[in-house]
Image (cartoon, helix red, strand yellow):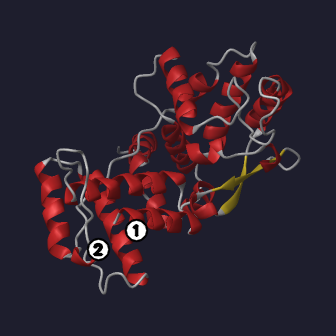
Amino acid sequence: MKQAIQKFVEHLKVKNASPHTRRNYLSDLEQFYAYLTPSDQQGKRPEFPLHQLDNLVIREYLGHLYDHKIEKSSMARKISALRSFCKFLCRQNILKQNPAKLVKLPRIPKKIPNHLTVEDCARLIEAPDLSTPLGKRDRAILELLYACGVRVSELSDLNVEDVNYKESLILVRGKGKKERLVPFGQYCHRALEAYLRERASLVKSNPEGTRMPLFLNHMGTRLTTRSVARIVEKYARLCALHQKISPHGLRHSFATHMLNSGADLRSIQELLGHKNLSTTQKYTHVSIGHLMEQYDKAHPKA
């Protein structure tokens, strides 16, 4: 089974699954494998014959997870990983039918996305110290997250040549390596130009490294998604914001503020890189409060 799991993860890479998905599915399947093959006193695990993988085995495993009170979102992902893995085994003619096909996903309550006010976004973006190269980099990161609503992984993957300053557009590579062009405004434009003038000093700290990544760390290498998250959290603390905020929170803020200002849902869907409109529609719930506020202000009998 262990070899089959590795082949499945390689298959996901070929199918352009994101590193995040590959990492999570690998972790979920390794956990499943560990459950099926408890180690002996020497720490060795017996091999599990794949032909014995059936619906009963999967249901027993899910019962084990329920007993450990796994969160519904984690449970849903683990079931999705098992479904995809078993589907792969069927295509490889290792299994005759998918034993996980009929397993139902748990219902996950929809959460209203966390977002900042326009004023708090401005405070956050203006927090970095612009007298240092890293401060200018951080300002550019915050401006870009809010101006374009990109995912943190998309921002981390940006290269210098992906920014078209003449047209004020960035080329974003989203889920499944799908590309989209996203515009940015004058504030983001100025922040990016200010950072690029300082970027060379960061490149010098790693002369042997690649010159492609747009956002670099102090060692001159590509900034990771975790590092970007830490940067956002750092300035949120400095601003003493009333709520926790992450790069994804700035993405939510981007979509919510666009919707509140009159942008149509289809345009927001394109900008965010959502495959389905239903994914974008969650922002309509966020805007109910805004609509009620406008109603109270404008209606004569409110």
Q: Nearer the viewer, residue 209 or 267?
A: 209
Q: Which residue is mark 1?
A: 4
Q: Say if residue 119 shows up in the picture.
A: no
Q: Nearer the viewer, residue 193 or 118?
A: 193
Q: Residue at x 48, y 18 (%)?
A: 237
Q: Amino acid at mark 2?
A: Leu
Q: Quadrant of the C terminus?
A: top left
Residue 202 locus on image (x, y percent) = 78, 25
State the image quarter where residue 289 is shown: top left
**Is 161 above or below relative to 47?**
above
Question: Image check: 289 left or right of 168?
Answer: left
Q: Residue at x 19, y 75 (%)?
A: 55
Q: Earlier in the sequence, mark 2 or mark 1?
A: 1
Q: Quadrant of the N terminus?
A: bottom left
The disc placed on residue 14 is none
For the residue carrying disc 2, how many other residues have a C-alpha within 10 Å: few (<14), some (14-19), or many (20+)?
some
For the residue carrying disc 1, how many other residues have a C-alpha within 10 Å: few (<14), some (14-19), or many (20+)?
some
SS for tag 1? helix
Residue 91 locus on image (x, y percent) = 42, 83
Circles 2 and 1: CB distance less than 8 Å?
yes
Q: Which residue is mark 2?
A: 50
Residue 115 locus on image (x, y percent) = 46, 38
**Is 133 above or below relative to 187?**
above
